[in-house]
Image: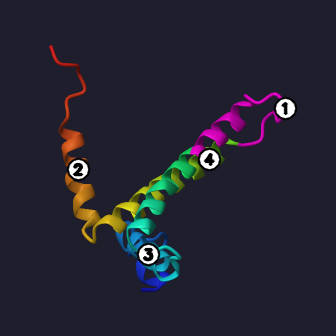
């Protein structure tokens, strides 16, 4: 599958699930750690990406007095996108039906009440 294959009908941005499949395929083709170890490492990658979100937020707010302001809110947005992509690719690593698993879970989450139980 090429990157061109994942472009949506408007030709502007990749369609989500074909793009996830493409990224997964590319990672699988170059993986140095196949099998269960590779799965675990791909899931652990999420922790690294979440750490980058935290670093960007701290850099945006200037919380480290030695560094000052080192990031922007655009950087935070980009890092959050990396977290989402990494999570979806990790899910695809666990199951070829990542889209179905995600959509069923999203449906359950959307059906949860927002109020605490009485």
Q: Which residue is mark 3?
A: 34
Residue that badge 2 annotates:
105
Give the crowd class for mark 2: few <14, some 14-19, many >=20 residues within 10 Å.
few
Give the CA separation, mark 1 to mark 3.
Answer: 41 Å
Circle 4 residues within 10 Å: few <14, some 14–19, many ≥20? some
- Other residues around mark 3 within 10 Å, as few (<14) / some (14–19) / many (≥20): few
Query: Dot 4 corresponds to which residue?
Result: 52
Q: Pointers 3 and 2 in contact (CB under 8 A)?
A: no
Pointer 4 with pointer 2, Cβ within 8 A: no
Left or right, residue 20 beside residue 27 = left
Whichever of labels 4 and 3 marks the residue nearer the N terminus, that label is 3
Magenta span of residues: 51-71
User: By what rule are the colours in the image chosen?
Assistant: rainbow
> How far apart are labels 1 and 4 at the CA level?
18 Å
| Residue denoted by label 1 | 66
How much space separates mark 2 and mark 1, taking CA atoms? 43 Å
Q: CA distance from mark 4 to mark 3?
A: 25 Å
Question: Which label lies toward us, 2 or 1?
Answer: 1
């Amino acid at each position: 599958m090429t990157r061109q294959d994942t472009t949506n009908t408007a030709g502007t941005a990749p369609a989500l699930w074909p793009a996830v499949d493409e990224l997964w395929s590319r990672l699988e083709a170059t993986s140095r750690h196949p099998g269960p170890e590779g799965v675990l490492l791909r899931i652990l990658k999420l922790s690294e990406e979440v750490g980058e979100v935290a670093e960007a937020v701290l850099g945006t707010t200037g919380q480290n007095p030695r560094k000052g302001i080192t990031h922007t809110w655009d950087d935070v947005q980009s890092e959050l996108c990396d977290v989402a992509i990494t999570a979806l690719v990790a899910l695809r690593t666990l199951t070829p039906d990542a889209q179905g698993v995600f959509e069923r879970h999203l449906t359950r989450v959307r059906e949860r009440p927002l109020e605490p139980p009485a």
